[in-house]
Amino acid sequence: MKYKLIIILFCLAMCLHTAAQQQSNKVEAGIELDVLPYATGGWFAAAWAGKDQWRMRVLTASVNKPNFTTKTGFTNHHINAYAVLADRFLKKGWKGWWLGGGIVLWNSSIQTDAKLQTAKFTNFLLNGSAGYNITLHKKIYLSPWAGLSMRVSGSTNVAVDNKLYTLPFFNPEASLKFGIWF
């Protein structure tokens, strides 16, 4: 499944790039991978298109949250995330600092330490993030970043094994992206 999504996002990026090139030489598109989901045993894929210092990103990820980031007494917090984000670069050429934000959907599952049941729940979050693109070679870059997502709707108290899990109001994250544009 994850490879199909990566292929679909790659094709989407290529289509966006082709369409953009026909309209204006200033619109570019690219794809990104993020280290954090892979480090937790999950996966990540993103495609973006942009012009001047603005870009729009769509992404999907599967993340196994580390237990130290989950409320005591709970384990196996798994998140399938989907997001639409807008980014603004401070410099042209997709270099240097960028600020971004958008809406994120989390479809989650979690267990207690007893692992008797698995509860599933959904949340919408607003995300704000910042990062720095470091050019490795022409159109290949690394981008360390950090963000904060705020829960705005969805499940608040999820019952599992006679306990209640509440997704924190603020959810910080940080990672490293690898990207290329066409």
Image (tube, rainbow, N blue to C red):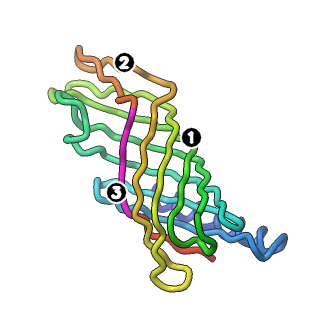
Dot 2 falls on a residue whose secondary structure is loop
Could you tell me which residue is drawn at 28 percent across and 20 percent down? 160
Q: How far apart are the alpha carbons under marks 1 and 2?
A: 21 Å
Q: Position of residue 49 (x, y in %)?
A: 66, 63
Residue 36's mark?
3
Q: How far apart are the alpha carbons under marks 3 and 1?
A: 19 Å
Disc on the earlier residue, 1 or 2: 1
Disc on the earlier residue, 3 or 1: 3
Q: Position of residue 34 (x, y in %)?
A: 41, 61
Q: Is residue 30 above or below residue 166?
A: below
Could you tell me which residue is drawn at 57 percent across and 44 percent down? 102
Q: What type is the residue that disc 3 sits on?
A: Leu
Q: Give residue 39's quadrant in the image.
A: bottom left
Q: What type is the residue that disc 2 sits on?
A: Asn
Disc on the earlier residue, 2 or 3: 3
Side of 2 relative to 160 (left or right):
right
* Foreground disc of the pair 1, 2: 1
**Which contiguous range is marked in magenta?**
170-176
Q: Position of residue 120 (x, y in %)?
A: 39, 28
Residue underneath mark 1: 103
Residue underneath mark 2: 157
